[in-house]
Structures are given as C-alpha cells and as structure tokens.
Amino acid sequence: MDIGEELGGLLGARAVAALGVSPSQIESYGKAALVGENGELEHAAAILHPKLGKPLRAAVEKGAALVPSSKKRGGMGTPLDIPLGHKDAAFVRSHFDGVEVRINDAPRADEILVAVAVTDSGRPLPRVGGLQKHEIKGEDGLR
Amino acid sequence: MPDVKLRKLVTGIEEIFHEGGPVAPTPRRRGWCLAVIHNPFAGKYVENIQPFMDDLKPLGMEMAAKLIAALGGNRGLIDGYGKGIIVGGAGELEHAALWHAPGGYSMREHLPDSLAIVPSTKKVGGPGTRLDVPVTHKMASYVRSHFDSVEVGIDDSPRADEMLLALAMTVGPRIHSRSGGLEVSDIKLKDGQKRQKPIFARSWWWSMKCILNRARLLRRPRAAPPPLLSSPTPLPAGLWLTSRS
C-alpha cells in the first residue's frame, strides 16, 4: 500500500512533466495496474486504491473526482486500457476516454505494471452532449 | 507535390534500471518518436513516388529534434539509433521505402559522429500492429553492446490510408551488456562499420583504402546540427492536421 503512495506522486508528476503543461492545466486522469502471472488481482488493488490517489491529486492540483481505474492479470506485452475521467467532475461527458498502454517486456511473472494517465483536454471533437466542462461546480466530484 | 498531412505524433521514453542484475548508476534510456501521416498514394498505383521523400524531410527533422529533446537534449550521449515504418492496408511496401532517406538523414544531421548506417525495418499492417525497430551504434554498426531493438506501435494507427513513421534512439549499451564482440572503445576505423584490423592482417591495398577513406570522412563538410525545439513543439510550416470526414 505504501508503494502505491510513492508511485502516485512519482508517476503523477512525471506524467504531467511529460505533457509539458502545468499541473493546473491537467483536465482528466486515470490509473491502472497489470499483475504478472504469479501474482493476484488483489495485489493490484493494494497498490491502486488505498493510497495512490492523494499524491496523484496533489500532482494535478485539486482532483475532486474519483480516479477511474482498471486492473487485470496478464503476461508480458499485454495491453492495458486506462480509463479516463474529468479530474473535478466525474460526469463531464467530453472527458470520458481511455489510453492504451503496453510494454513488450513487462510485467514478468513476478512483476506488477502500474500506470497513471493524465490529459490536458477531452476528446478532440466532443459532440454527444451531457455535462460540459464550463458547467462544472467541482464540489462533490460528480458535477 | 503532395502535402504531408500529420494526424498525430507519439513520443515515448523508457528508462531501464536493471533486468535482474546489478542496478546501473545511470538508467539506460530508449526513446522513440512516431508520426502518423496520410499516405498520398493509398488505394492506387502511382509510378513516380520519389518526390515524397523530400516532402518528408521537415517532418523527419522535427521528429528527431523532438526525440533528442525528450531524451534529455544531450546529443553526445545518444549513441544508438534505428528507424522503421508501417504502411496501412491501402498502401504498398514500396511506399515504406520512401522513409529510408528522410528518416535516416534527419537523425544523422542532428547527431555528431553518426557514421553508421541507420538500421531499419518495414511492413504493411493495420491499426495496433507492432514493429520491432532495430537499433545499432551510431559510429560503428558492429558494436555488439548496442545491438538492440525498440518495439513500437499505436493502437489506432496506421489506418488503411495512413503510414506510421518511426525513429528510435538509445543512450548507452544494453543494461547488462556482457556478450563481448566489438566494444565502443575499439572503434577505430571511423567508416561506420568496424574497428581497424591489424594492418599486417590485410593487404597493402586494403590499408591504403582505409587511410583514404578516413581522410575523406574527416574532410567531409559537416554543418552544425540544427537547434533543438523545446517540447511541446509547434507544428512547422507545411504540416497540418488531416481533416477527416
């Protein structure tokens, strides 16, 4: 669980830096873990859920909404789809998205691949309605 | 002359701390820059395709600059490279060969001491196809510690009428390199391939050829490498997003 806390800060800060934007410009986020064949799904849950969120939210400023997540077991090169949702309001429809990640030599049987994804925008041409970005209150994490 | 219509750029960096052995003081780095562009020859047979090589040059330079910046910006540390391309299903393998010149020379323009041929690979494939881009040392193709490959791919690319262009660069040898062969410290010939064998082991004619070759390389005018752009980079003139209906 403690490694989850460390990874939340490290991966969050690195992801923001890789985008080349300031933390306040981050609009959506997500997390996921892929457990190698000798581990169990519960190991992914221990890293992702108890402590990873708080330092991740610090890395993207605010973050009232739930951090959407996914997890699975798999071998090396298994693709992992990280769900994305708006960081301050989970109902923002334009920011429902996913990022596929994959590392050809990971996870080995005794490893866990932990992933954090951030964006500075929603889908490119959103036009399916729903709650809009400018309508966010950002208080309850939903709207 | 067809325009280069760029749909997306993907840049990735890998930092390898160990592979089961001792943890390296400096992690080994591998990086790649991928560009997805419209294939102007998709869906038809076009006889004269070579002008497109010149059109790809600015994009190649942009990708190389982006990749060097992503690897930390120190050109001297980057010592391995490779290139590759995946052509979408409505194109042909011959279109992939157009990437050889602009892809290779874009990296060699940016990297001083890059004498070796840039290894490459190509195929035709659908979205999500993976490509193993071969990597060799930039100064001498036979350096064994730097033989490697970088697996690349994009889940939604290339579409049938697109091509996915790839450049790869690496910093340092394989993380636990210990298979012998030609080492970086043994590079002497400076012809891009091998060390120099002892003169007596070869013919007089061969040694003269080596000396002349080296003199020719030293005399070769080498322009200062172009400046690096900071990331994220603006699109250069002549590149714009593909509009899709």
Image (cartoon, coloured by chain):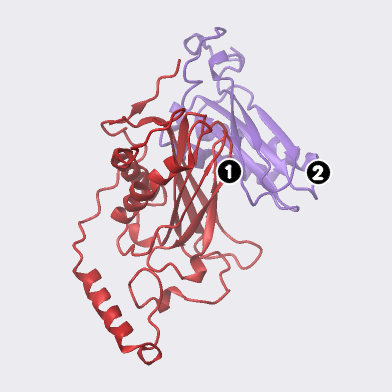
Please tell me the numbered disc located at residue B130.
Answer: 1
Pointer 2: residues within 10 angstroms few (<14), some, or many (20+)? some
Residue at horizontal 40 percent and vertical 69 percent from the top: B140
The residue under label 2 is which amino acid type? Glu
Task: Depth check: give the residue in front, A116 or B35.
Answer: B35
* Residue A134 visible in the current orientation: yes
Q: Please, which chain is the residue tagged with disc 2 on? A: A
> Can you say whether B173 is above or below B129 in the image?
below
Mark 2 lies on a secondary structure that is loop
Chain letter, purple:
A
Chain B colour as displayed: red
Task: Depth check: give the residue in front, B18 or B60.
Answer: B60
Left or right: A83, with B188 as reference point: right
Q: Which x, y percent locates residue B39?
A: 42, 32
> Can you say whether B56 is above or below A92 in the image?
below
| Image quarter (top left, top right, bottom left or bottom right) of the C terminus of chain B | top left
Residue at horizontal 26 percent and vertical 75 percent from the top: B214
- Do marks 1 and 2 both belong to one polypeptide chain? no
Give the labeled residue for mark 2: A40
Task: Kindly give the residue lying farthest to the bottom in the view shown.
Answer: B200
